[in-house]
Amino acid sequence: MKNVLMVAEKPSLAASLAAILSNGRSTAKRGNNGCSTHEWTGHFRNEGAVHFRMTSVCGHVMSLDFTSKYQSWDKVDPVELFDCPTEKKECTPKQQMRSFLAHEARGCDYLVLWLDCDKEGENICYEVMDAVQHVIHNVYSRNVTYRAHFSAITDKDIKGAMESLGHPNENEAKSVDARQELDLRIGCAFTRFQTKFFQGRYGDLDSSLISYGPCQTPTLGFCVKRHDDIQTFKPETFWYLQLSAGQPEVTLEWARGRVFKKDIAIMLLNRVKEHKEATVESVSSKESFKSKPQALNTVELMRICSSGLGIGPFQAMQVAERLYTQGYISYPRTETNQYPENFDLHAVLRVLQPSSEFGDEARSIASDFQTPRKGKDAGDHPPITPMKLASRNDFDRDTWRVYDFICRHFMGTVSRDLKYRTTTAKLRAGLESFSCTANVLLDAGFTKVMTWQAFGKDEPAPPFVQGSQVAINDVRLAESQTGPPDYLTEAELITLMEQHGIGTDASIPVHINNICQRNYVRIESGRKLIPTTLGIVLVHGYQKIDPELVLPTMRSEVERMLTLIAKGSADFNDVRRHATKIFKLKFMFFVQNIASMDMLFESSFSPLAESGKAHSRCGKCRRYMKYIQTKPARLYCSHCDENYTLPNGNVKVYREFKCPLDDFGLLAFSTGVKGRSYPFCPYCYNHPPFRDMPKFGGCNTCTHPTCPHSLNTLGISSCVECETGVLVLDSTLSPSWKLGCNRCDVIINCFKGATKIAVEESKCSDCGAQLVNVVYKSDKSKFKDGSEEKTGCIFCSAEFSHLVEKHRAVASRQVRTNAPRGGPNAAAGPGGPGAAAGGGGAGRGGRHGGRPPKDKMAQLAAYFV
């Protein structure tokens, strides 16, 4: 019997697909990386009975990054990043996804790929194929590897996709590779240069990264342009006539609207005042219509969620993704807003009819079904449509609101148009014309189900008869001023991005979220985007040096070239080289003219020398350095003109201790009483003195042989929860003592109130951990026999068991189960792509002998509950 490996994009999706394809007869086994494997026997194409094996990845398997030589921000000139070599790396090395896929592929004859049906999904297809190429023979053959195309997680769609398998699209996969590489090179080059240049000069930027992105920056540009329009707006005074006539009295609108010269307005007013009556020239009625909506695509979903539901586009797409993977809606990333001709709209209505929320409306619409409006068929996926009925109790509040909107929007697309009657009366007083209009609802149409678009109250018809004369009750001159435009809302920004080709339906919410995270804009009531000083200065700086860096035209052209790659009309290497060359020249020009942008920063932000407050001494000049708490937190020595990055959290001077290597004063970092804490030297934190000490590591990772605060002195035992960590005694908050892992977030609180704890040279004979000596004051001893001092093993000694909390991991600890689908974050700074990798737990120079034996590991694991 032959074997078929099938791979989905997420574990939850693999489980749903396996349940459908096996008719609920699959068996599951869980892997070490959070991805389960489902197995069953069934029929496959012309092979007859085969053994199916369904598993998944967690988004992208691989990400693009620079080779290790170009990772350092300090040693690499950013201009080199445009030409330096890159390499594919596993997105989440701990998951060992490539090894997992290769293991599951053993003995398999065929590969069926069930990745999401978009360009990113095609790219992941080739990542999976690359991972199993040495296991599945001839995996790139069209007779071995197949691609399933589907738009919803329903029996009909999934089984239909299985019956009509296609093949992966290499051109679309290459277009994603090109976008990833361009975003990495361009984003990292500009970001590294800007961040180092401006953070080395100013102390109150309040942003960890001064990032540039080919899509992110034009997105910010739209927000700043609107801000500039508001700031430069000059109000103009205008005048208009207000006339009221008839019984009951009706106020009419002036046909001229308004005039901007007062003397002309006064002249026209006086001419009207010459007449006591107005002539009714016409009274006309006509039926008007408000069209029902087109089918729902991604951009419209994000717009409505932002403007109508108050849910940002990034969160809205996360909710939509969950609804899709749970089978409640069709695929949520689509540009199409027209239903295919063979789409069974009646079947969707039948799904919704049992609902207690909108079932009555669904049944009513089913009995008066209307043909949907035509729209745009982008050739990708059908519009977003409900697939399965849910109730309010199935979801949290926001998820229900998004699902409810999708259902009601679908019903609105197959409802009647809204119909109303408009009655207009036109009157003339001398040479001036006036009018009034009244609207009366005739048929609520689609607004019966889309209630938020309901027609307003009926208005009484104008009390005028054509050809009659009516008394003018009053006429006056009113004065007003033109007003500035309002700040952009998220919905308006999404529209602008779509119109100018900035980003895709999948990446638009990411770009908007990025400019918020970078502190370039802030969101205020009404989901309005208000640029910060930093965002405004950046955009104005780009405009002074090279306006194309912030205009949407450059990115639109790049997107056009990427689309040509996806269609097979342009060569991948030609496009990549052409775009890289253009942006490299622009980068070099930008660097040469950075002084123009710096003048704007200088007038908006404070120099480092004037920022922060005195904190701890510099080891080089022994003068006090200033502690700058705004992002990124750092110490600045004005005498040496040096910056030292600090960890994000509470940082205070650690008594009067100094580092024995560089004479810098030690600092104590903590995330609070219940969180992580450790001492560190600000110089060693930024410039590790030992090869096995990671950058941005504290004293608990330093292997200095004699320092009383180092890992060698205070290490107790290897961590039982992570592979490389060491549990190190933390005395920064004494008399509250704890052991903390120097790699993960494991914490063990112990010996509260003890006056002194020392780590001994000798080890526990049972588990291999270092012994500790614990001292209490005579009147505060917590030992059961009342003694002041004892030595033993923190894990094994019975005298210590009641003084050690079993285990607690801080709230920030999490298991990563989903790699990001997009390319690498081009704006990554220290600690992201381009940062030095951290070393493993070296232990205490061999003192604690590594991990305890396996039988003792199980005993120690009892602490980790």
Image (tube, rainbow, N blue to C red):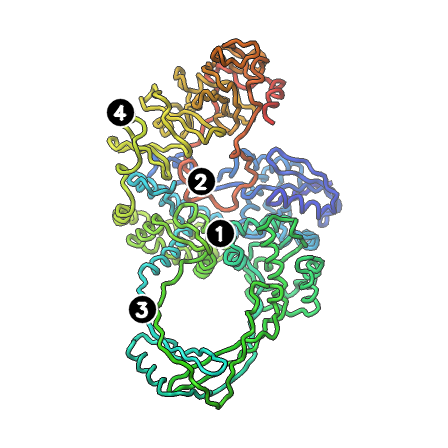
Name the residue carrying label 1.
Answer: 509
The image position of residue 544, as x and y in percent, is 28, 54
Name the residue carrying label 3.
Answer: 236
1 and 4 marks in contact (CB < 8 Å): no
Question: From the viewer's perspective, is the residue at label 4 or at label 2 nearer?
Answer: 4
Category of crowding for the residue at label 4, using alpha-carbon neighbours closer than 10 angstroms: few (below 14), some (14–19), many (at least 20) = some
Kind of element beneath mark 3: loop
Vertical position of residue 793 compared to residue 168: above or below: above
Q: In which quarter of the image is residue 61?
A: top right
C-alpha distance separating marks 1 and 4: 48 Å
4 and 2 marks in contact (CB < 8 Å): no
Query: Which kind of residue does numbered mark 1 sit on?
Result: Pro
Question: From the viewer's perspective, is the residue at label 2 or at label 3 nearer?
Answer: 3
Looking at the image, is mark 3 or mark 1 earlier in the sequence? 3
Classify residue 11 as left or right of residue 197: right
Looking at the image, is mark 2 or mark 3 earlier in the sequence? 2
Query: Which kind of residue does numbered mark 2 sit on?
Result: Asp
Query: Which kind of residue does numbered mark 4 sit on?
Result: Arg
Name the residue carrying label 4.
Answer: 622
Looking at the image, is mark 4 or mark 2 earlier in the sequence? 2
The image position of residue 136, as x and y in percent, is 62, 40
At a point 51% along the width and 38% down the height, the residue shown is 90
C-alpha distance separating marks 3 and 1: 37 Å
At a point 62% along the width and 40% down the height, the residue shown is 137
Q: Residue 65 carries which label?
A: 2
Q: Nearer the viewer, residue 710 or 528?
A: 528
Q: Which of 76 and 666 is in front in this view?
A: 666
